[in-house]
Image (spheres, rainbow, N blue to C red):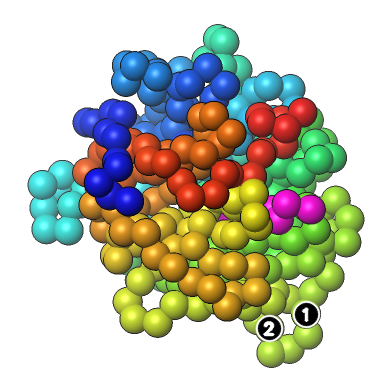
Amino acid sequence: MQDTLRELATGLLFPEGPVAMADGSVLLVEIGRGTLTRVGADGTVSYVATPGGGPNGLAIGPDGFCYVCNNGGFKWTEPNGPGGYRPIAQADDYSGGRIERVDLASGAVDVLYTGTDKGPLKGPNDIVFDTEGGFYFTDLGKVRARDQDRGAVYYARADGSMIREIVFPILTPNGIGLSPDGKTLYVAETQTARLWAFDIVGPGEIAKQPFPSPHGGRLVAGLGGYRMFDSLAVDAEGQICVATLVEGGVTIISPDGQSITHVPMPDRWTTNICFGGAELRTAFVTLSSSGRLVALPWRTPGLPLNYLNRR
């Protein structure tokens, strides 16, 4: 598929969280710049808002606002160093994890959540809305010189009235998505390159599996070798398309874990994928270390997202 790649934007500062909009533009974050950025259909780059910290995952909510997982900020490698530009630790000026709501018209940023009764959010990463107007999100946590946080998965309401922890502990949870019927929540772990499934029994409620599951999830797939998982999107057939680090590309996993294929990309830090265009048959992929947004035709259409492609 690489021979069909179209480069839509370059010079981005570690892009992530792409959302393909109806007007042909793509919203994304530049984690290294602290911005919510729009790439127009003609490739024009403009800035919607500057939340600061480390804006990471995005989703459009039932009110048409953009909901942002902000990880609070990273420490980075040198831009031209070995391995490319990438995050390596919690920022010295770390501003705290939070969920933000952005008015796309004005660029105004409101903070919705900074924690729960269990403690503060550490590094919110990826987000997906259900049909009830609530959203699930991962908190990967932060890494410091001698220790690192234990991750969690949360459920919250878009109006700021409720947030609760539903999975803890989980090791570096990153990508998150819902099955086509909305009954399964998928979570990808970065460091283990494992994809987990959680059975949803109500809005923000999951039926947990017993021991030896470490957190109540069902293992869908785990990759061997040295690879890591990042963010994900689900296609219309229910396959989970997980951005994959080190072996840069997108790993496509069937819901039963029996079929696993890899679509290579020209960047070891391939961090996210979303679907847009006619019939959602175009994949938009962030190649973060090299600062690019690319597009390519996808073999299956993407799954419509609540409040974006599905009303």
How many numbered circles are shown? Answer: 2
Local crowd size for mark 1, using a 10 Å CA cut-off: few (<14), some (14–19), many (≥20): some
Mark 2–mark 1 CB contact (< 8 Å): yes
Q: Nearer the viewer, residue 285 or 35?
A: 285
Local crowd size for mark 2, using a 10 Å CA cut-off: few (<14), some (14–19), many (≥20): few
Q: CA distance from mark 2 to mark 1?
A: 6 Å
Disc 1 on helix, strand or loop?
loop
Q: Quadrant of residue 89?
A: bottom left
Residue drawn at the location 85% of the way across and 51% of the way down: 203
Q: Which residue is mark 1?
A: 209
Part of the protein shown in magenta: 175-181
Spot occupied by residue 307 in the image (x, y as percentages of width and height)? 71, 30
Spot occupied by residue 162 in the image (x, y as percentages of width and height)? 81, 42
Image quadrant in which the C terminus is located: top right
Residue drawn at the location 54% of the way across and 67% of the way down: 253
Spot occupied by residue 78 in the image (x, y as percentages of width and height)? 15, 48
Q: Is residue 278 left or right of residue 15?
A: right
- Residue farthest toward the top in the current orientation of the protein: 106
Number of the label disc, if any, that sits on residue 213:
2
Q: Is residue 140 magenta?
A: no
Residue drawn at the location 42% of the way across and 41% of the way down: 297
User: Can you see residue 236?
Assistant: yes
Is 211 drawn above or below residue 186 in the view shown?
A: below
